[in-house]
Amino acid sequence: MSFFDSEVVRAEMTEISELQEDVYRNVFKFPTMSKEEKLFHVGLLEKLIEKQKILYARLSLSDDPEAKLMKKNIVDSAQMMGLSSDVDMNIVFSNMEQMLEVMKSQIDKNESDL
């Protein structure tokens, strides 16, 4: 059975795709969102990153050629965005999670200043 034939993997990929659509749909509205909307949006980003991190771990553990190719494509995409070829994607995910924590604290700080 191929990696992508797994019902669990297909369900996770569908959820990732839906989360990405939700995030992208509202990304340009972010500056005008209310505090609650901003926190909800950041929550979607947190969920998306967590799902991507899990999928990446599954890809890393798989011997399936298609899974290896997808993992390579993820690393290649990261390199096109300026990351080095030897970057540990787990560190990238961890840094993204930290950035979201900073965003949440900034949202709380900025809203309390108003």
Image: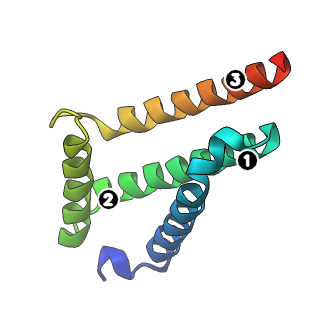
Q: Secondary structure at mark 3?
A: helix
Query: Where 110 falls versus 67 (above or below)?
Result: above
Residue sitting nearer the eye, 48 or 71: 48
Q: Is residue 47 visible?
A: no
Which residue bears the numbered disc 2?
Answer: 59
Residue lying furthest front in this view?
32
Q: Is residue 56 visible?
A: yes
Which residue bears the numbered disc 1?
Answer: 40
**Amino acid type at mark 1:** Phe
**Amino acid type at mark 3:** Ser
Number of residues whose C-alpha sits closer than 10 Å to that of mark 1, classed few (under 14), some (14–19) or many (20 or more): few
Quadrant, the N terminus:
bottom left
- Judged left or right of residue 30, residue 4 is left
Number of residues whose C-alpha sits closer than 10 Å to that of mark 2, classed few (under 14), some (14–19) or many (20 or more): many
The structure residue drawn at horizontal position 21% and vertical position 62%, both measured from the top left corner, is: 68
- Describe the colour scheme in one phrase: rainbow
The percent position of residue 9, horizontal first and vertical second, equals 45, 71
The percent position of residue 105, horizontal first and vertical second, equals 69, 23
Q: Secondary structure at mark 2?
A: helix
Which residue bears the numbered disc 3?
Answer: 105
The percent position of residue 38, horizontal first and vertical second, equals 71, 41
Circles 1 and 2: CB distance less than 8 Å? no
Return the disc, 3 or 2, that comes first in the chain's sequence: 2
Quadrant, the C terminus:
top right
Circles 1 and 3: CB distance less than 8 Å? no
Return the disc, 1 or 3, that comes first in the chain's sequence: 1
Q: Measure the C-alpha gap from mark 1 to mark 2.
A: 29 Å
The structure residue drawn at horizontal position 75% and vertical position 21%, both measured from the top left corner, is: 110
